[in-house]
Amino acid sequence: MTTLHPLPLECRVLLELVRISALPQFLGSLLFKPEPDRNRPNKMYTAVKPLSKYLQFKSVHIYDAVFTLHSKCTVALLLACTFLLSSKQYFGDPIQCMHHDDLNYFHAYCWIYGAYVSNASEPQSLYDGMQCKPELVGRSVLRENRRYIRYYQWVVLVLLIESFVFYLPAYLWKIWEGGRLKHLCADFHQAVVCKAKSKAHLGNLVSYFNSDYKETHFRYFASYVLCEILNLTISIVNILLLDVFFGGFWERYLNALAALYSGDLEKWNSITTSVFPKCVKCEVISTGAGGSDNVYDNLCLLPLNMLNEKIFGFLCIWFLLMTVLVGLKFIYRLATVLHPGIRFHLMRARGRFMPKSRLEETLRNCSIGDWFVLMRVGNNISPEIFRKLLEKLYEEQGNIKKDSSLAEDV
């Protein structure tokens, strides 16, 4: 009989957010006016509740701090942005056009076929006295001067896909790790008040590290490094794709952030409006009763771009920060692989500065995989217990040497 395993918590969070958000109804809701959903606040709470469980700290940490920020916190951030942008009740329709006939049709048409702004410069006097001053939108824009805006159809979907992609390394490592650290360290968290149990668990840990698991530990270490490389690759590719998706996103938005930092709000508004225009034009063509084409020139609002410019302003800083941190972590990882002295000093610092001669003897036959697993164990137990573990390993190695020397004498 086939056993059905429950989905991981992270997958359930993603599916729940997609289910309760307006994403599945984004296009269809433009064709009719939906009834107000009075249970929406309850649905929001339903979404946030599993997300809060996802962000809870575990007793055993299988990821380091940078890995957690990159894969776990970034995913939560992207899911929160996805939920905000797809919640129509709180931020309105994604596009609103001005026309007195068949308004829903014009909304749907401009949403599907895209609106546009002008690349041609026009005097600002054209917009004097207007409540809405569209950036570079003229009263009559030639086709060759039009820049069509279609990305707004995909922003929610792109953020959702990004959340899946950023979570991929964490998901792979969770599978490959297989609960090894939990098996090695969880008992110490449960036996804090019982010295007898703690001593027994410490003895089991010493026996484990005295066994020959070099090949297993090397695969464990190599899998983690592969996930770190994947983190760095995802960060770099994400930056490049955002630039393609928005057409020169980084060049403009970095200038916008610099203007915001210097307090030049006018420049900030000008640059962000060029990336996320709030007022656009839409040309709707329909066939009249006589068979001739009727052209309607509409002014449309993109209310969500008020939120988009803030969200992507923050994400811009966050993605750059994650890329720098993951890059530095990769350099650190290369240094630990290539330089045994760095591994020794890191272990000594973790072991409360155990005497140098003893630690050298303890790590003499320790492979890089063994060192990595030891360090991961050290990150999940108290420094005092880890120091005792290293001392026990030193004593056990001394006994093994005595036994081997006695065997040679015989």
Image (tube, helix red, strand yellow):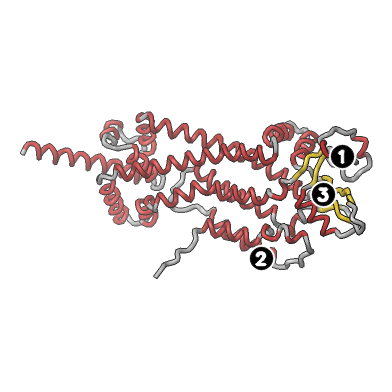
Q: Earlier in the sequence, mark 2 or mark 3?
A: 2
- Which secondary structure lies at badge 3? strand
Crowd around label 3: few <14 · some 14–19 · many ≥20 (10 Å):
many
The answer to the question of whether label 3 and label 1 lie on touching residues, with beta carbons closer than 8 A, is no
Of marks 2 and 3, the one in the foreground = 3
Distance between mark 1 and mark 2 Cα atoms: 46 Å
- Which secondary structure lies at badge 1? loop
- The label on residue 194 is none
- Picture quarter containing residue 280? top right
Q: Which residue is situated farthest in the front direction here? A: 291
Q: Which residue is mark 3?
A: 301
Q: Which residue is mark 1?
A: 141
Residue 304, percent across and down?
Answer: 75, 50
Residue type at mark 1 is Val
- Picture quarter containing residue 269? top right
Q: Quadrant of the N terminus?
A: bottom left
Of residues 178 and 374, the one drawn nearer to the viewer in this rendering: 178
The mark tally for this picture is: 3
